[in-house]
Amino acid sequence: MLEILLYVQAGLCIFCLYRIIRGPTIADRMVGLDIFGILVVGICAILSILTGRMFILDIGIAWIILSFIGTLTLAKYLENKNLNE
């Protein structure tokens, strides 16, 4: 069952990559990148359960933190503000 979920999430990642590449606006690309990050964390969680290696969850947590920081940075950039404000 978990293997099926892994394949489903990998397939959904392909749709997110399509939105990131072909997004008409930067905001669409940003949303696609956020959803892609969430799917990658889900894949890390499933792989952690399947393999029994808990360090994969640490990779997922690091990924989501970097994704959050990147989203904040891009939002500041789109508002034409300096990053230190």
Image: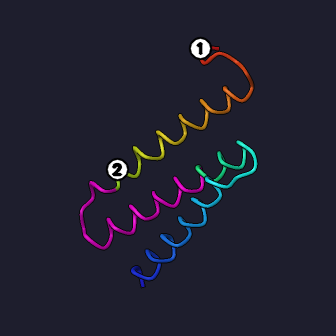
Q: Which residue is mark 1?
A: 84
Classified by dominant secondary structure, the portion drawn in magenta counts as helix
Q: Name the residue at 48% across, 46% down.
A: 64
For label 2, count other residues whose C-alpha is less than 10 Å away and answer few (under 14), some (14-19) or many (20+).
some
Lateral position of residue 80 relative to residue 4, left or right:
right
Q: Amino acid at mark 1?
A: Asn
SS for tag 1?
loop
Nearer-N-terminus badge (1/2): 2
- Can you say which quadrant of the picture contains the N terminus? bottom left
Q: How many marks?
A: 2
Location of residue 15 (image quadrant): bottom right
* Residue 23 percent location from the top left of the image: 70, 52
Q: Name the residue at 61% across, 53% down.
A: 21
Lateral position of residue 25 relative to residue 59, left or right:
right
Q: Which residue is mark 2?
A: 59
* Residue 69 percent location from the top left of the image: 53, 34
Q: Name the residue at 33% across, 70% down.
A: 49
Location of residue 55 (image quadrant): bottom left
Q: Amino acid at mark 2?
A: Ile
Location of residue 68 (image quadrant): top right
Q: Which residues are magenta?
A: 34-56
